[in-house]
Structures are given as structure tokens and as C-alpha cells.
Amino acid sequence: MLHDFAASLSVKQKRAISLCLIILVVASSSVGVLLLAPGVSMSAGAFIVAALIVIAAASVLMHHLVSPDEQASTVADTTQAKTFDVNDLLGREQLEEELPAVSGTFEGRNVLVTGAGGSIGSELCRQIIRCNPKHLILLDHSELLLFKIHNELRDKAPDLRITAVLGSVTDKPLINEVIGENDINIVLHAAAYKHVPMVEDNALQGMQNNVIGTKVVADAAKQYDVDRFILVSTDKAVRPSSAMGASKRLAELVIQDLATRSNHTRFSMVRFGNVLGSSGSVIPLFQDQIAHGGPVTLTHSDVTRYFMTIPEAVRLVLLAGSFARGGDVFVLDMGKPVPIRHLARQMIEASGLTVKNETNPDGDIAIEITGLRPGEKLHEELLIGSDMLTTPHPKIMRAQKTHLSEIEMANVLQSLRQAIETRNRTLLGTIATQWIERAELDDEEIINR
């Protein structure tokens, strides 16, 4: 066996082993100490340990003598060695296992998930397959993300019928075909451009995808008598200060309008804040910055955000959808907002490092303030006002929201399409100002307006 193991080594590995200084001290405890010369990998040392155990039947401890060059490059490795649970830092309890089952709503049904490759969409799919649907249809415009989630779900549920559809929610013929030919019962609409700075710089594309795309999918759901349509929304839709938030509020208004004119489909929307670990969120950004030695960047020293785990948020979305009566705006209880500067400090310290600042100039990681980005708020809101209604679950509330009339909504959509087709950003801004409740923000809180 040892001969076979040695034969499998490369020439480079054998040469590395030849550089080792082996000191085997057999004491009364039969403990040996193996010293590896600088430049010898730990894997090579593991081979020597195996050899010594076989030959001497001794317990061997291995120490790696680090060269000066290796010492200079171990900062990232040191931070990575310290692991921690972000949920502990945020003080959030793991609630997803406590939530009641939602399988009754989805069992034996044909379910369409748009944006199926994204952070929320993919988790929706993972939880839905546990509800034993009849047919799960995944739709996403990213070939790579669609490929990944499709393969993952096929491995987890090989007997379930799963169909991957590559395309955009703005493609009306495609959406009509998918919903009509597959006899869809439930639509979970998670497809959206969601990154605030990106959508701010590409507002027309954001409006087309987030608003017109929602209208296309919702119209098809109504036309083909889908039972339930659930829009995944965001806290940034409340008094929006960004193009992304405005697009999501307009999408909500689209759904509220259709709900007033639907005889069969129950339209609803679920609004929540940031989810831990989603693509582009602040926590993975901080983790990456810490791993590379810093600095950790904040847009403002006083900025706060709501957080929730992805599985918890998705379970609540599925549960809220089962409560829908039509036109509901569900708001998830996100707990207390988290000061992001405090979170940054906690993550640095949880990594075994210290914050570098004026009082601690020899610290490891600095925190730098970069300034609020276009459209970014200091503090997010989940609801305008306090007129909340309860639901069967204490973590889900129902908001009483006003909405536009059918004629007003038609005017909004007509103007929006005109702005998109003519690339008229001024008209786009007028639409948002006229029809959406906007935040009254100080100049300090929002820039480039």
C-alpha cells in the first residue's frame, strides 16, 4: 500500500520530500515530531506522516517551519481560518424550521418560478420541490444560473418533472406559451434587477425588466386563470429614492391594479429587506474585503439595514402566498434594523482581527467611509404608516395600501413604454415623481438628484 502511494507521487512531490529534515524522537509516550523544511507543502508532510505511522506505528505530530516569504503572505489565510456564523452576529434566531408547512398549497400543482437562478428564486425552487408539486418550471434569462439550478434540482428530485426555460419575462409570446401550454397553477415572480447602483445607472432597462416584465407575466397569469400570483418585492419600494425601488413600487401597483379586476387569480406581493448571503449584499462583500486584508468600506457611518436569512424569507413568502385573498401586500417582520458599521466591526473581530483606527493605529483592518451611492438611503422602511393587519402567522403582516385606478395605471404604463422606447430618462423621472410616494430626504441622504 505504501509502495503504491509513493508511486502515485509526482517528481515535484518526491523532490520536495527529499528536502525534509526528519527528526523522529521516540519518547515514553511514543510521540514523534516531524519538522518540514521551508517550501515543503503540508501534503508532502502528510505523506511522510503516513509512512512513519506504517513503519514505526508511532503517533506523529507535524509542524511546518514557515519561510519569511510564506509569513508575509499568510494574512488572508489567517482570516479564513477563523469562521463564524453571521446569524449570531446579527442576533437573529433561526426561524425557518419553526414555520408551519406550506406543502398543501403547492402539492400536485404546476408551479412557475421566474428568476429561478437568483438567490431568492433558487431557494424558492429548493423549498417547492419538498412540497411535491406536479411540475416545476424554472425561467431565467441567465443561461449559467439556469443550468446550475436545473442540475441541482434534478439531483435532489430525480422523479419530479422539472423544465428549464431560458428567456426574459419581457418576452410576451414566450411567457404566454409557458403559462398557457403548461397549465400553470401558481406563479412565483422573483425575476428582477435588484442592485441599486446598477439599476440607477441603467434605469430604463431596470424599468423594462422590473415593471413591464411584471405586467407581461401577470397579464398571462390572469388570461390563463392561474390560481395564485405572488410578486417578490422589497423594502426599497417604500418611498423609493432609487430607480430600483421605484421600479419595484410600480410593479406592486401593476399587481394591485390587476387584483381589482381579476375574477379567478389571487394576486399578492410580499415585501421584505436584505437577505443574508444573497449575491451583491454587504455581508459577502465584507467577508471578501476582510479576507484580502481590508479595508472594509461603508457608504455612511450611520447606515442601517434589515436582514433575514434566505430560507426564512422564502418560507415566509410561500406561506404568505397561501394566505392571499387578492391584492394583498404582505410585509415580513424583519426584526430591528442593523447598524452596518457595527456589523463591520463585529465581522472583523469575529475573524480574529482588530479594527485599525485613530485609537488603534496598529490594528489589522480599517473601516473606510466612501459616501452614499446614487439612490441609496440611510435607512430603509418596510411600510408607510402603521396601519397593519394581522395574519395567521406572527411574522407576516398585511398592509392596507392605496392603489391607482385602472385608467391611472394605463396612463402610467403608456408613459413608461414611451420613455423606454425613446430612451427618455427625463420622462422616466417625471413618471416616478408623479405616481409614487417619494421619500423626503436630506441632501446628505441622497446624491445626484
Image (cartoon, rainbow, N blue to C red):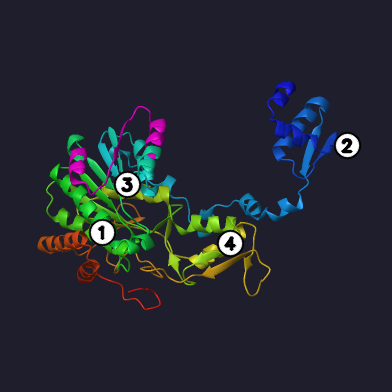
Residue 85 horizontal/vertical position (percent): 55, 52
Residue 195 horizontal/vertical position (percent): 37, 58
Identified at 25% across, 36% down, the residue is 110
As measured in the structure, the alpha-carbon distance from the residue carrying label 2 to the one carrying label 3 is: 61 Å
Residue underneath mark 1: 207
Say which amino acid is labelled 4. Answer: Gly
SS for tag 1? helix
Identified at 34% across, 44% down, the residue is 116
As measured in the structure, the alpha-carbon distance from the residue carrying label 1 to the one carrying label 4 is: 35 Å
SS for tag 4? loop
56 w.r.t. 99: above or below: above
Residue underneath mark 4: 294
As measured in the structure, the alpha-carbon distance from the residue carrying label 3 to the one carrying label 4 is: 33 Å
Say which amino acid is labelled 3. Answer: Gly
Task: State whether residue 389 appears in this view.
Answer: no
* Mark carried by residue 25: 2
Residue underneath mark 3: 115
Crowding at dot 4, Cα within 10 Å, few <14 / some 14-19 / many 20+, comes out as many
SS for tag 2? loop
Q: What stretch is highlighted in magenta?
A: 149-178
Residue 433 horizontal/vertical position (percent): 23, 71
Q: Does the magenta stretch include residue 236?
A: no
Crowding at dot 3, Cα within 10 Å, few <14 / some 14-19 / many 20+, comes out as many
